[in-house]
Each structure stands twice: as structure tokens, then as C-alpha cells.
Amino acid sequence: MAELLDLGRAIAELVHDGDCVALEGFTHLIPFAAAHEIIRQRRRDLTLVRLTPDLIYDQMIGMGCASKLVFSWGGNPGVGSLHRLRDAVEHDWPAPLEVDEHSHAGLTNRYVAGAARIPFAVLRAYVGTGLEEVSSTIATITCPFTGERLTAVPAINPDVGIIHAQQADRRGNVQLWGLIGVQKEVVLASARSLVTVEEVVDELTLRPGGVVLPSWAVSAVALVPGGCHPSYAAGYSERDNGFYTAWEPISRDRAAFSSWMDQHVLAAGR
């Protein structure tokens, strides 16, 4: 059953050095506050998994949290590159970063297999991408029934899955809605899970198209209003488009990045 914890305690109890950690949320409900707390607690040697390692992982990588990145697209949406990610890959700053790149379909299927507790997923994909030539987690297999050549990818079972949602009730049941990505699969695939939420209510009011995660599937819930800024939570906040634009010059320069993180992230924990 999910515990209701404050964010600092939840990260301290759930996220450890060397863990495989997935922070998911597609366009909205991106768990920035949880990522910032991981940075403040100075977690190191993490394997970070995410479909779209946008600003949230640019910040974590730039602050030295990660040694490996598993992903399927990387960039500052609508703006350009992730300069802290590029600096780590190209120049080992602040630490070397191993990368394992997939397609959206491939990585999503890895989560689905992890949630189902089966060892791998099979799909028609990767033909012509060249990714299978550089990744040890993409393999060609033969269908035992038709002889067709297909692609297999291993399941991902993160040590910790972290998402943001709109609501939880006091028993730890969670509901999220709007543009949904792989949040449900990440929680079910992970050994431990944390959901930060905009609001804790007495009873969840079920919504058409809403996704409900039962308390037994979640390790901890933390009340963090605004915990997905600069992304948005449908029904609660709007996307801060200006932040994404402003991040471009900040992230290009190591000194500017370090100063911004010290002022806006690290200072919050002092």
C-alpha cells in the first residue's frame, strides 16, 4: 500500500546510488520536482530511462547524477539540443555518459514487457535505423510459427519509477488524465515507485479516459503542487513555454548552467 510521504523523505527512501531510475511523463506531468530532489540529495551513478530525455534529464545529467542513459529521443522540445547531454556524451562533462538509444515503440515495449514480468518484447521495428548495430539490447529473432524475422528488446524493470499525476486519495490510489504516455507501465514495471501529485483528495472522482493506479501498485505518494513545472498538469496548470526557450542559452554554458542550478534548485534544499 502506498505511503503518503513528503518529497524529501520519499526520495531518500526510494532512490539510491547506482539505481536504474525512470522519470516519465509525456509532454505534461513531467516530474521535475522529484528530479530536483534527486539532484539535491546528490544521487550518483544512476541509469536514467526515459522516452524523451528533455530538460529534466539535461539537468540531472549536467549535475552529475547519471552514468547511463536509455532513451528514444532527446532534445529541448521546439527549441533545439540538450547541451548538458551533449557535453556529457562528447566531452565527459561532468562525467562520462553511456547511451542506449531506441525507438519510441521499442522502449515502450520494453516497459510493457517489464510490467508484464516477461523477459522481452517482440515487434516489427528498427529496420533501416542502424540502431541494432550499436545496441546490445536490440536483437533479431525468428518467429517459431511463421519463420518471419522480427526484433526483440529486453524488458526494463527499473529499481524506481517516478511519475507526476493530478490526484491521489488518502489511501494512496492515484488518478491521472490528459495526454498519457507510459506512466502506468513504468509504475507496474518498477520495483519501487513514487507518484508526486497536485492534490490529495478524500475520494477520487473517476474521469472518462482517466488512468487509475491502485494503492497496492504504488510505493509512495508525495503532495507536490506544481511539481511538473515547466511542463503542465491538465486541469491544474499551463506549460511554461518561455522556460524552454530560456533554457537554451542557460544550458549552453557550463558556468551559466551551474549558477542557475545552484540558485534555483540546490538553494531550495538549504
Image (tube, grey):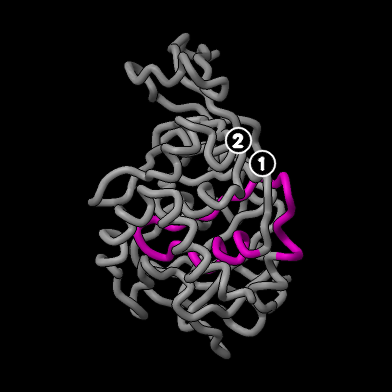
Find out whether residue 19 is within the magenta segment.
Answer: yes
Residue 133 located left or right of residue 221: left
x%, y% of residue 7?
Answer: 64, 73
Residue located at (50% from left, 37% from top): 88
Amino acid at dot 1? Arg
- Tell which residue pokes out farthest to the top in this image: 147
**Front residue of 27 and 201:** 27
- List the residue tagged with mark 1: 117
Residue located at (58% from left, 34% from top): 96
Residue 124 falls in image quadrant:
top left
**Front residue of 122 and 144:** 122
x%, y% of residue 58?
Answer: 45, 50
Give yes or no for contact between labels 2 and 1 (Cβ–Cβ under 8 Å). yes
The earlier-in-sequence mark between 2 and 1 is 1
x%, y% of residue 134?
Answer: 48, 18
Amino acid at dot 2? Ala
How far apart are labels 2 and 1 at the CA level?
A: 8 Å
Compared to residue 215, the image places residue 126 above or below, namely above
